[in-house]
Amino acid sequence: MMLGNVAIARGFLEAGVQLATAYPGTPSSEIVESLAYFSKYNSGRPYVEWSINEKVALEVALGAAISGARAITAMKHVGLNVAADPLFSSAYIGVDGALVIVSADDPWMWSSQNEQDNRWYGLHAYVPVIEPTGVQDAKEAAKLALTYSWKYKKPFLLRSVTRISHTRAPIIVGEIDYKKLELKGKFRKDPSKWTVVPANARRHRVSLLEFWDKINYDFALFPLNRVEGNGDIAVVGVGIGYRFVKEAVEVLELYDNVTLFKIATPVPLPHPLAEEILSYEKILVVEEGDPIVELQIRNYATKFKSRVQIYGKETGNLPLRRFGELSLSEVIVSLAKLTKRNPPKWALYDTKGRQQTNNYRIPSRPPVLCPGCPYRSFFYAVRRAVNKTRVSPVYSGDIGCYSLLLLPPFRMQDTIINMGASIGAGQGIAKTISGDNNITIAIIGDSTFFHTGIPALINAVYNSTPILVIVLDNYTTAMTGHQPHPGIGLSATGSESPRILIEEIAKGIGLEKILVADSFNIKDSENIVAEAILYVKENKKPALVVARGSCILVAIRYATINKIPRPTYVVIDDRCKACGICYKLFNCPAIIKQKNGKAHIDPSLCTGCSECEQICPYNAFKPSKEPDPRWFKVLRTARPIF
C-alpha cells in the first residue's frame, strides 16, 4: 500500500534519481519527505534537501541536471509560480542529465489560496507534461518522466492532483539500483549552451521548437497512453479523468458503445493520437482542471478541417465544470446525456451542480487552532496590546496555520494573498493609511519568512515603512507536516545543520527595533507587542517581533518520546464565574461551556500548555498535579523528530 506521493518517490528511485529538492506544500510534501526518509537509511543516497523556496529548489535541481545528474524537484501548484523564471530558462538550455519538475495541483483548493491547472505551464514554456491516472500510474509516470528527460536532455513536468497525491492503493514495485543513486556527474563547460544571453537564447528558441515538434509525435508511443474498446463514440480520459470515465462506462454498461482513449501525455497532445481521436463523429473529453486537452483537440480539428462534434468543458451543455474536482456522478451524467442513456438516480445533480445523495446533514467542523497552539496565546496578547495602545490595526496576513486567525473570535487576518505578501502588501497598506491611530501589522510564519519574507523585510527597512512585522517561530513548517527549515538547525534527513536566527537576519539588514517574545507567556508577549507598536507609531519605522514557542504537536511528540509527563488542567468550580473568556474570547477547543455557563476542560483534548491559567481573571484553572518543569522547557524548545 502506498500513498500516491510515496509511489511517485518510489518511481523516481527506480529511475535512479540522484538529487531531490523541494519546498513543502500540500499536496506535494510527501514526495521529497519519502525520499529524505529513504536517503537517511541509505547513506545519504540520493541527496535530498528542503530548499528555501521553490525557485531555489528548481535552480538547485537544474544545476545538478546541467552537471549530468538525474534530478527532481517537487512543489504544489502555486509553488511553480515562484519557480517560473528558472522553469522557462531550463526549457531553453536543457540538461546533460535529467530533470523532472513535479507539480501537485489542488483542484477545489483543499489547502491552497487558488485553483490553477499547471499544464498551462507546459504549453507556455514548451515543457512536456506527463499526467498519471492513479497511484500505480503515478509510480510508472515518475519513472518514465525521469527516463524520458534523460533521453531527450530536456526538463519534463509531472502533474499530479490531490486525489492522486493523497490516495492510498496497492501497487506493484520494480527494482532499485542502489549504485545509480549516488550523486556524481561532470560539468561540461559550454557557455554557448548554458548562458541565455540574447544571441544564445535565440538559437535555443529555434531548437526548442524543433524538440517540441519531435516530442509531439514521439509521445504517441508513450507507454501509459492506451486505446480501449471499439465503439462509435470517442471518450478521451485525461489523467484522473480516465478513472472516472472507466467507472462511468461500467455503470452505464457502455462497453460496446465507446472507444476510450487513456491520455497520460496531455501536453503536447500527440499529433497521431489527435488524428485518431478526430476520426470519430462524437468526442467527449474528460479532464480535471481546465480544458487543455479539449482545446488542443479543437485546434487540431480546425487544422484538419474536421466537423466532428467535440464535447467537454467548453461546450456548456454537459455538467462538466471548469472549477473544482471531477466526480463520478458528473462524468456519468455527461456520458449518459451524450449516449442517450438514463443515469442512475444517485448520479443526478441539482441546479448548483452538486450531487444529490441523501438527506443526512453532516455537522460542520470549523477549522480551529489546536489546543495549546502558541499562536492562540500570542494573538490573545496581541489583541490586548492593541487595546492598550489604542491603535486601529490592519492585519496583513499570510499562508500558514495562522491563517485560521481569520475566523471568530480573533478575526485578525484582513488580507491573505500569497506566501510573503503579508510584509510586501502590508507595506503598501502602511504607506497608504499611515497617520492618526492606524497601524499595519504583518503576520508571517517562520518557514514563510525564509521562503519570501526576507526580501520584503529588506524593502521595508530600505524605504522606512512604518509597519510592525510579527514572525511566528514555532520551530517547524507546521501546516505542511512539520518539515524543518533554516531557523531550527536540522536538515531534510534530520541531521544537525547551521541554525539561522530570524532576529540575526533582521539585525544584518539594518532593522533597528527587534524584539523576541515567549509565545506561551501572555503578559510578556503583550508588553513586547505594545512596545513595538509604540515604536512604529512614534518613529515611523518598521519594527520586528519574533514570537517563539514550539508547535504543540511537535512538543507533545518530543515529550512522549522522551517520557516527559505533561500536565492536564482542571476547573475549580466555585471560582469559575461563567464569564466565558476562556471558551469565547480565547476559544480553546479543550474548554467546553457547561449548561450553567461555567467552563469544563476535556482532559482528552487538554495539552497542558497552561494558557488557560494565565487568562482567567478568577484563578479558576489549575493543573491536576504539579507539572514537570521539563515540560515547560519542551514547550519552548522542541524541534521536529525524524
Image (cartoon, grey):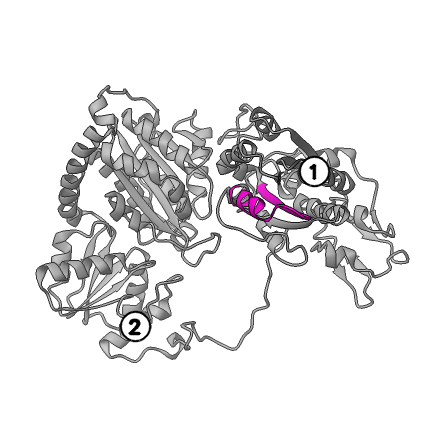
Q: Does the magenta stretch include residue 127?
A: no
Identity of the residue drawn at 60% across and 60% down: 366
| Mark 2 vs mark 1: in front | 1
Q: What element carries label 1?
A: helix
On residue 228, the disc is none
How crowded pointer 2 is (Cα within 10 Å; few <14, some 14-19, many 20+) is rated as some
Question: Vertical placement of 132 versus 177: above or below?
Answer: below
State which tag comes first along the sequence, 2 or 1: 2
Residue span colored magenta? 424-444
**305 vs 59: above or below:** below
Q: Which amino acid lies under the numbered mark 2 shown in the image of this protein?
A: Leu
What residue lies at 70% left-to-right and 38% top-to-bottom? Answer: 538
Q: In which quarter of the image is residue 506?
A: top right
Residue 154 appears anywhere in the view: no
Give the side of residue 111 with respect to residue 169, left or right. right
Which residue matches tag 2?
Answer: 318
Q: What residue type is labelled 1?
A: Glu
Q: Which residue lies furthest to the right in this view?
A: 574
